[in-house]
Each structure stands twice: as structure tokens, then as C-alpha cells.
Amino acid sequence: MATTTLDWSQCRRGEHPRKVSGAWVFRGTRVPFRSFENLKTSPIDEVLENFHVTRDQVLTVLDFAAKSTQAVGTVAAG
């Protein structure tokens, strides 16, 4: 299975600061996007409580990732 690399620079909720080892984080936080691997096994409310980000932030990032993955799949299939 191929791994898709997303262009997080296009996500309005993210920033790439030097403060978290260069990882993409939610704008204005130190919470890296990669922490949302937890969404695979945890309810969104639990993730919101543990990571102190807003539902809008999470939904925006998840939507961006889903649309970007679909776009990559469409280009690869075309």
C-alpha cells in the first residue's frame, strides 16, 4: 500500500513551526497533526479533551486530509 504525503502548507489550520521538531501543528498550538493517529481508536471528544484543540480545528484538518487523499487517488487513477 502506497503512502500519501499531504501538502500541509495548503491547510489553513496548520503551521510548520520549529517548536515541535519541525512537525506540522495546529496553528497557535504545539499539537502536531500526527497526534491524530488517535482518531483511529478514540472518539473525537476524547481526542479534543486530551489535546486541547477545537472541534473545528480537528474537522478542518480531517477534511483537508480526506480531500487531499481523494485528489491524489483521482490523479493516480486518471
Image (cartoon, helix red, strand yellow):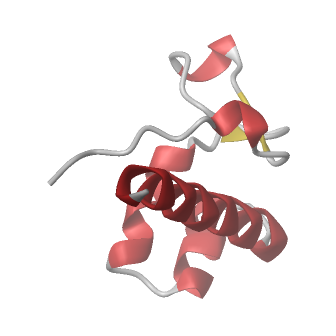
| Figure check: 52 above or below 23 | below
From what the image shows, is residue 75 above or below residue 48? above
Quadrant (top left, top right, bottom left, bottom right) of the N terminus: bottom left
**Residue sitting at 57 percent across and 82 percent down?**
44
Q: Position of residue 20 (x, y in %)?
A: 57, 23
Q: Closest to the observer: 30 or 12?
A: 12
Say which of 49 and 77 sits in front.
Answer: 77
Q: Image check: 68 left or right of 52?
A: left
- The location of residue 6, given as percent across then percent down, is 52, 41
Displayed quadrant of residue 55: bottom right
Which of the two residues, 17 or 46, is positioned nearer the viewer here? 17
User: In the orientation shown, which residue stands out farthest toward the top?
Assistant: 18
- Residue at horizontal 52 percent and vertical 65 percent from the top: 70
Image point 37% across, 59% down: which residue?
77
The residue positioned farthest toward the left in the image shown: 1
Report x, y in % for residue 28: 85, 38
Q: Residue at x 68, y 59 (%)?
A: 64
Work out which quarter of the rendered image holds the C terminus and state it: bottom left
Up-down relation of residue 37 to residue 35 (above or below):
below
**Residue 11 in the image: above or below residue 77:** above
